[in-house]
Amino acid sequence: MATTNDLKNGLVLNIDGQLWTVVNFQHVKPGKGGAFVRTTLKNVLSGKTLDRTFNAGVKVETANVDRREMTYLYKDGPDYVFMEPDTYDQVNVSAAVVGDAANYMLENSAVVVARHDGNPLYVELPASVELVVQHTDPGLQGDRSTGGTKPATLETGAEIQVPLFLNTGDKVKVDPRDGRYLSRVSSK
């Protein structure tokens, strides 16, 4: 148990039997009346967000979520297999839990697997991943100055929008949370 004064981003709360992550919080002390805490919560399993207000000092139940860095090994049927680098223990995680992260995971890449009571909740990738463009149509000479985009297929099979100057074989940096192109990775 914690109080609303202990809330911080990333903390997982157990509200009505469901797990919610604190995305944003704000302590408010109005000139008249008691203080309160305004929060934005995200459901760990469904991804649904909701705004909730708590009175200051109220006790909230926190959930014990174990976040461990693991290595993605391979896909085994409908499951994905991850390994703890320290103990070499392997964990199978269903495709439903992995979700869209599967579009940006390469074998032997480091990810964070969050578990509650031994059950995997979600897989979190780094803020950016570097992937090779497997196929994209060539940009036309006159199109280079317009700043437009074109579709590109990455080595994982994910399809994103990239600038016109990119070619097949280029390495790009992608934000795995929304599939947005960030930059081209120079081959030094």
Image (spheres, grey):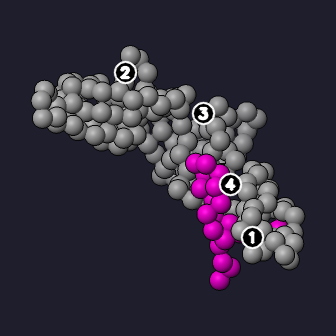
104 on left or right of 10: right
| Quarter that holds the N terminus | top left
Q: Residues within 10 Å of mark 1 (few under 14, many from 20)?
A: few
Residue at 53% over, 46% down = 124
Q: Residues within 10 Å of mark 4 (few under 14, many from 20)?
A: some
Residue located beneath label 4 in the image: 106
Nearer mark to the viewer, of 3 and 1: 1
Nearer mark to the viewer, of 1 and 4: 1
Q: Is residue 147 above or below residue 2?
A: below
Question: Which x, y percent locates residue 6?
Answer: 22, 37
Residue located beneath label 2 in the image: 15
50 or 144, which is in the foreground?
144
Q: Amino acid at mark 4?
A: Leu
Q: CA distance from mark 1 to mark 4?
A: 33 Å
Residue located beneath label 3 in the image: 97
Q: Amino acid at mark 1?
A: Thr
Instruction: Give yes or no for residue 179 being in the magenta stretch.
Output: yes
Upstream in sequence: badge 3 or badge 1: 3
Instruction: Give yes or no for residue 62 being in the magenta stretch.
Output: no
Q: CA distance from mark 2 to mark 4?
A: 35 Å
CB under 8 Å between discs 2 and 4: no
Residue located beneath label 1 in the image: 146
**Helix, strand or loop at mark 3:** helix
Upstream in sequence: badge 2 or badge 4: 2
Residue at 61% over, 63% down = 182
